[in-house]
Image (tube, rainbow, N blue to C red):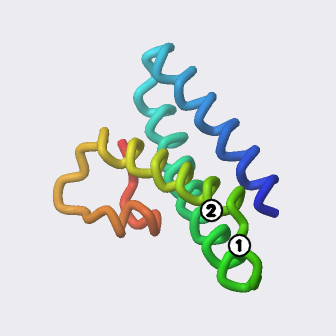
Amino acid sequence: MVILLDNHSQTLLFNLRRFQELGDKRGAGVIRSSCIICFAHLSVLCEAIGKLEAAPHTELSALCDLALERLCGLVRDMCVGEYTRLDLLLGVCAIL
């Protein structure tokens, strides 16, 4: 599941860059929102699996850190007004 979610997040990130290059702000906003949700779920899944397993998983930890890094980068570039970052992670507000 982690590998599938990671692959999907990479595809979304590629598509986001492509839409930004084309100047499609609305499409990029939809994809950015999906990226945020995907990276948030990926980091939570990695964290949960890491807690369930007794042995340390350096790859899983690195993937979790990378997902959180990318998540921060996506949220940092946004103008969100009155919404909090938690709202964005939960997908509460629409990204325009």
Residue 55, horizontal then vertical, whole percent: 76, 78
Label whose residue precedes the other's in the sequence (1 or 2): 1
Residue 71, above or below 2: above
Q: Residue 48 versus residue 34: which sits nearer the camera?
A: 48
Residue 44, horizontal then vertical, whole percent: 58, 71
Disc 1 and disc 2: Cα gap in Å? 8 Å
Question: Who's the residue at 37% across and 60% down the image?
Answer: 93
The local crowd at label 2, few if under 14, some if 14 to 19, many if 20 or more residues have their Cα within 10 Å, is: some
Q: Which mark is residue 89?
A: none
Question: Who's the residue at 48% across and 45% down the image?
Answer: 70
The local crowd at label 1, few if under 14, some if 14 to 19, many if 20 or more residues have their Cα within 10 Å, is: few
**Amino acid on which disc 2 is placed:** Ser
Residue position marked by numbered label 1 in the rendering: 56
Q: Residue 26 versus residue 1: which sits nearer the camera?
A: 1
Which image quadrant is residue 26 in? top left
- Identify the image quadrant of the N terminus: bottom right
Residue 11, above or below 69: above
**Amino acid on which disc 1 is placed:** Pro
Going by the picture, which residue comes out furthest to the top? 22
Contact between marks 1 and 2 (CB within 8 A): the answer is yes
In the drawing, does residue 47 fall left or right of residue 77? right
- Identify the image quadrant of the C terminus: top left
Q: Which mark is residue 61?
A: 2
